[in-house]
Amino acid sequence: MGEFRSGMKHGKGKRRKRATAPNCKQYEGEYALDKKSGLGVFTWESGNMYGGCYKEDERHGYGEMYWTDGSCYKGYWQNGIQHGLGTMSFPDGRIKEGIFENNIYKSPNIDENQQKQLKA
């Protein structure tokens, strides 16, 4: 359900893997030429949820990921993975804040110039 251009999803829309199943993969947000692009929310069958920016069908830019175990990542993504400035919080209260590279927490220390570069 949504907007189309030349037979492709383009603009705002909503897609569910199985229209009649309440717990299935679903996406609601913006599309460009049949790919998730812009702001959107994706929910997995497990209940995990991502809300934020997409580019070429991948999480890219700022976004927030919530897992059903209570973990949460708020920060930057690149090509579908945690990459850049972010904060990961865990159900036991631990928090990792700083630089993430390829889904791996690298460093808590970051100066103003690094922050500007990561957000660009």
Image (cartoon, helix red, strand yellow):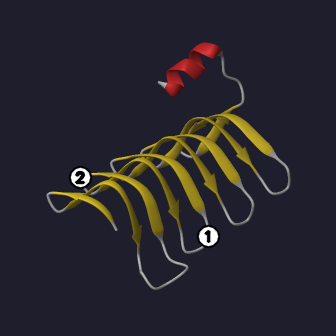
As drawn, 21 above or below 83: below
The image's mark for residue 47 is 1
Identified at 60% across, 73% down, the residue is 46
Please give left or right for residue 9 compared with residue 49 in the image.
left
Q: Please rate how many residues cluster around mark 2, counting C-alpha atoms within 10 Å: few if below 14, some from 14 to 19, many from 20.
A: some
Q: Residue furthest right?
A: 92
Please give left or right for residue 42 compared with residue 65 in the image.
left
SS label for mark 2 = loop
Q: Residue furthest top?
A: 113
Q: Amino acid at mark 2?
A: Leu
Q: Amino acid at mark 1?
A: Gly
Please give left or right for residue 12 compared with residue 53 in the image.
left
Q: Which residue is mark 2?
A: 33
Cβ–Cβ under 8 Å for marks 2 and 1: no
Residue 54 lies, in percent from the top left, at 42, 47
Using the rendered view, name the quadrant where residue 29 is placed: bottom left
Along the line of sight, the residue nearer the viewer: 116 or 8: 8
Q: Residue furthest bottom?
A: 20
Along the line of sight, the residue nearer the viewer: 98 or 3: 3
Q: CA distance from mark 2 to mark 1?
A: 27 Å
Residue 71 lies, in percent from the top left, at 72, 56
As drawn, 119 above or below 67: above
Q: Please rate how many residues cluster around mark 1, counting C-alpha atoms within 10 Å: few if below 14, some from 14 to 19, many from 20.
A: some
